[in-house]
Image (cartoon, helix red, strand yellow):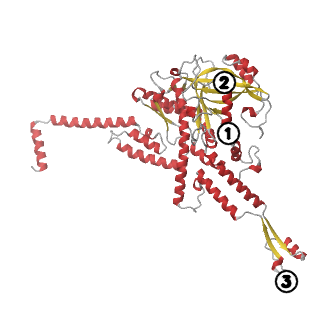
Amino acid sequence: MLDITPTNLYEEIESAERYRDSHLEHYNDVISGYVGPMYGGVDRDQFSPENHVYEYLSLTVPRVIHDNPRVRVSTRRPVSQGAVAKAIEHGLNRWTRDTNVRSVLQRVAYDTLISYGVILTTQVPMPGQDPMSGFKAYWPNCYRITPKRFIIDPVALSVPESRFTGHMWVRDKEDLLEEAKIDPSWNKEVIETLTTSQGMEDSGFEKGRGRDVPERHEVVAYDVWVPEIELKESPGPDFGFHGTIYTVAANEYYGEKDPSKADFIREPRPYYGPPTGPYSMFGAYYVPDTPYPLSPIMATMGQVDELNDHVRSASASAANYKRLILVDSKSKKLAQDVKSQPHDYVVPVEGLDRDRVIPLELGGITNQQVAYIEMARERLDRNSGIHDAMRGNVTGSATATEVSIAEGSSSVRLAYIKQQFQEAVRNVLSKVGWYLHNDDRVVFPLGAEAAQDLGLPEPYFMGGMDPSSRFSDLELELEAYSMERTTEALQQRRAMEAFQIIANVASAMPQMPYVDWGGLLDKMGDALNMPDLSSLVDSQMLQQMMQQQQQEAQAQQQMAAEQVSAQTPEEEMASERAVAGQIGI
């Protein structure tokens, strides 16, 4: 079992920070190259002429996250738990819009492409509550944790194997003391002895670039989740408690944090949340035997630096370029005429020797420099997956086949990054869904879309489902393309395709009632990025029309039978003779 004494836990934290910082050694350099020399006091002599980081982010982020995600929830027990799955689905889709989780995901998308991203999911009081009400509603919320403040077990070979995860946080010491007066779980005596932060570097940031601030009297502490520790007072996993959260801080000794002076500023408490913990990690590429993923930008930064070095060298050569004209020093008048006359002016010189006027060029860019810069740029584009067609710069120099191959290769690479990001988003929404399913303090209105689907005038979501329902029975999937951006032309084309599909399918529905038209339209809607395609057909109205047609057919058959039964023997014989005459008997 992990040693969770304050001294040892703080040493584990410092070890995790050293391991993390080794992966973020060039993090600030990447940010400086991304923002350019005109933002935030970046040294203009060290700027990147080939701003690959900005180009990659501007082309990739809109393709990764553009809108709030939508989910579909199914269950392994559709008969007994189908209503629960439908409620969680509407609750999650309402929650994504009410919290605008897109804003958090967009910031985390930048972190993911630069290094790695982290989201903290936890329960918070709902905004806009009536303070006079006796019931205090809660719901989940997501927060971005900067990579500089996140810590994970440095010995772990992967994220699920980590024995602890956590993050640094900063709060005013005075506010903590006030909260300790209300909440006895805070250790007021220990908080009073803490040394306040001396600057931004104690909060996980570096000095400089206008971020030097006066003393703020802030306290730097850490929340650490240890999944293997279960406190005696913990209700246990059957009641939604998994692991323990420790809040630890350390005093300074000769200007540095001293682990021997570390202590819990809050009593260890059971963690109420999903068994996967409060943190969700975002990454693009897996690296064997390490919990930290590899970002596409970090993987190509060596080539980016090499390209920029050669571009700077060529820029310096171009700046040193000179074009001189050598003349005979004995001919003073010739030198003055050459110097003073405007461009393209003809200077007549009697008895001029061609060797007496010699043009001379010094410096400038060489053909070798141009060739190597082009080769380095093509290699970077090949490794990063960026090409002219993706940039929108189609000059016609490449054939249609070459453009198609480049787009296909880039699509495969970008599709993998999007898949990794969407899987991490699905994990985040799964944590949110866990709280919606288990916490009976979650109550909020679902809106018009759910009212139409459920057939209720004003439905509310109420957490804390039937104890017989298990969250592990639910299966949560993101709707295809729900987070991606679509162009106006593509939207118009999809609208026309949807019209044609509905017109063709609607006419076939009454003739083939044995086909699951709703499921078929859902699949077609996923392919067209129109998840509500099946809702365009009113299934109840279709059912009524089919029943009405069946009733009319039955009525006609009954009327024909009654007419036949009402005929006299003479009329029946006459009708038979008439029929026989028509067929020639």
Instruction: Please state the horizontal and vertical placement of residue 530, each as a whole percent of the image.
Output: 48, 42
Element at label 3: loop
Indicate the amino acid at tag 3: Gly
Label 3 belongs to which residue?
A: 351
Q: Do callouts 3 and 2 mark residues in contact (Cβ within 8 Å)?
A: no
**Label whose residue precedes the other's in the sequence (1 or 3):** 1
Residue at 32% x, 35% y is 547
Query: In front of the other: label 1 or label 3?
Result: 1
Question: Left of 284 or right of it: where is 372?
Answer: right
Label 2 belongs to which residue?
A: 247
CA neighbours of label 1 inside 10 A, class few (<14), some (14 to 19), many (20+): few
Indicate the amino acid at tag 1: Ser
Question: Left of 418 or right of it: where is 45?
Answer: right
Residue 92 visible from this viewpoint: yes
Question: Left of 263 or right of it: where is 419?
Answer: left
Indicate the amino acid at tag 2: Thr
Question: Left of 344 or right of it: where is 305?
Answer: left
